[in-house]
Image (spheres, coloured by chain):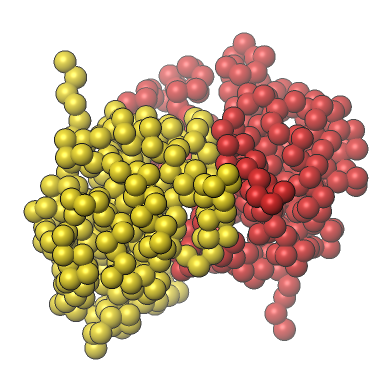
Chain colours: A yellow, B red
Amino acid sequence: MKMKPHLFADELIMAVRSKRTPCIVGLDPTIERMPADFLRERSLTITSPREEQARALYEYCDEILIAVHDLVPAVKPQSAYFERFGAPGVAALEMTMARAKQLGLLVILDAKRGDIGPTAEAYALGYLGGAPLGVPHIDCMTLSPYLGADSLEPFFTVCERSGKGVFVCVKTSNAGAPALQDLEVDGLSIAEIVADFLRPWAQRLVGDHGYSGIGAVVGATYAHTAARLRSRLPHSLFLVPGIGAQGGEPHTLGQYFNPDGLGALISSSRAINFPHLYGGAQRGGREAIRAEALKFIASVRSAVPSTA
Amino acid sequence: MKMKPHLFADELIMAVRSKRTPCIVGLDPTIERMPADFLRERSLTITSPREEQARALYEYCDEILIAVHDLVPAVKPQSAYFERFGAPGVAALEMTMARAKQLGLLVILDAKRGDIGPTAEAYALGYLGGAPLGVPHIDCMTLSPYLGADSLEPFFTVCERSGKGVFVCVKTSNAGAPALQDLEVDGLSIAEIVADFLRPWAQRLVGDHGYSGIGAVVGATYAHTAARLRSRLPHSLFLVPGIGAQGGEPHTLGQYFNPDGLGALISSSRAINFPHLYGGAQRGGREAIRAEALKFIASVRSAVPSTA
């Protein structure tokens, strides 16, 4: 008899409950933004060899992970900042994700992949296959849906087997998103049409806690569309970036949750990664990172008390 | 005085003219499809460690590159098949692209990336920055546009500095593409709206040969939309996948070219990569790969004589 795999959605809901917050921390490491003393200790500059810079990405993320691992249910490494340095960067990403898992965190790889047919299947197996051959230590990844429903299905199929999850970009947080995603066809926005690509699979892969690993990215900067998407995808987890630096306001976040106080993950990256630049801290380092994460968690808790 | 960089679009047009074909070869290496004797020589199976499988991807691509390098202007490695094996896979991709450049080929990385703000910039710098820190040996890459025009602009800006190029997915070759890309808003399809995201940049970055490195992916399976896109993006190069295995017919390819016989690249992957499975060959190997590439070039030349 084949065991039913542990579902990402179930593990996530349990982690949100035990950490008492839907807040997650994005990992967007860039050498340019790291504190001067961190770089000085490593004799590192933005012209150092890429192997050294990649190594620093891991070491900086390790600082963040140590600072926040007991506070949040998951982290979201952004693949671009690692891919920036080629193969050594990807090796640093793998080390970072391994470290996150070791510290008890769920890992959502923000990679926004999307392709068709056997190519989509190769991405899905590599990132979500759960096999020793691919990229290990990933629980969930983000996808981009421009190529259509049949470009997403190979990922959903692999999720069904492995228990892992995806967040498909439905409504993103950037200023230019509406020019494509809010266009309306027969009374439905493109975002809603993409939501409908997910719906049958989201319903089919619901876990024991009522949520599905087939989730949606819904940016915090467009709360007015969140309620419509929430009712359209009742079982989907929403990944909500765009709070803080991008202009999303905590007081609108209630729209992203279901009445049970669940269903959304609120993500913050830059302010927590670099509190000396984007937060209130005089200088960087573990304590400032932790203080900024606590501030973020408190702001979401006071804005949406039902999630606490 | 700062030198104007060599433009991808100019190098490509020159290579198309000197090789006398707009045909390019996709590199979609999968262990499952490699000939039995190639795997046997390496004692390789689909459960071998990922380092060994990644190494075989490079070695198999090397066979393809040796077989076709004097026949075509460019190759298009598909990132997914390398990422499938994590960091060692990405290292094999880098080796493959270095080898392609060494053999005088232009390299179009099919990665369909797309993200916003500083994240998009990190991808752009990593793949198209032309600096020693990122992924070397790339002339051009593919992008996915769901996040909107502002998600593409960081790539265009980096192209303007480095001279490299992009192909943005406008109309893809898969069966599910029309359900999103053919939807019409005020008489324009989503594909045409995305084409308009590119147009100002495509006009701005035109090279000495009249073409721009800001190009579009337009699938061979939808020739009826190609003519409309061709007139909308007169200076853009079109990357045209979907001939052969996916059902695109050579006789419709005229729609993708300008009257000067230029402006499109026709890509074929599976039949040439694996002639023993998808072509007419009894067995795989360099000679069969070369024969299949010659067959592909001849079929495009007879369908669109103006390109010869």
Q: Is residue A302 left or right of residue B39?
A: left
Q: Is residue A100 visible?
A: no
Displayed quadrant of residue B100: top right
Residue B40 appears at what percent x and percent y?
Answer: 43, 19
Displayed quadrant of residue B71: top right
At horizontal 80% and vertical 42% (from top left) the residue drawn is: B227
Q: Is residue A199 left or right of residue B283?
A: left
Q: Residue furthest front?
A: A187
Q: Residue furthest top?
A: B282
At horizontal 38% and vertical 32% (from top left) the residue drawn is: A200
Along the viewing direction, whichever of B62 and A173 lies nearer the viewer: A173
Is B76 located above or below residue B196 in the figure? above
Displayed quadrant of residue A25: bottom left
The quadrant in which the N terminus of chain B is found is: bottom right
At horizontal 45% and vertical 27% (from top left) the residue drawn is: B31
Is A36 located above or below residue A160 in the figure? below
The quadrant in which the C terminus of chain B is found is: top right
Along the viewing direction, whichever of A153 and A171 lies nearer the viewer: A171
Q: Is residue B60 visible?
A: yes
**Number of callouts in the render?**
0
Is A196 located above or below residue A110 in the figure? above
Residue B230 appears at what percent x and percent y?
Answer: 79, 47
Residue B245 appears at what percent x and percent y?
Answer: 63, 23
At horizontal 56% and vertical 33% (from top left) the residue drawn is: B176
Is B128 located above or below residue B47 in the figure? below
Residue B163 appears at what percent x and percent y?
Answer: 68, 64
Q: Is residue A146 left or right of residue A158?
A: right
Q: Residue furthest bottom?
A: A282
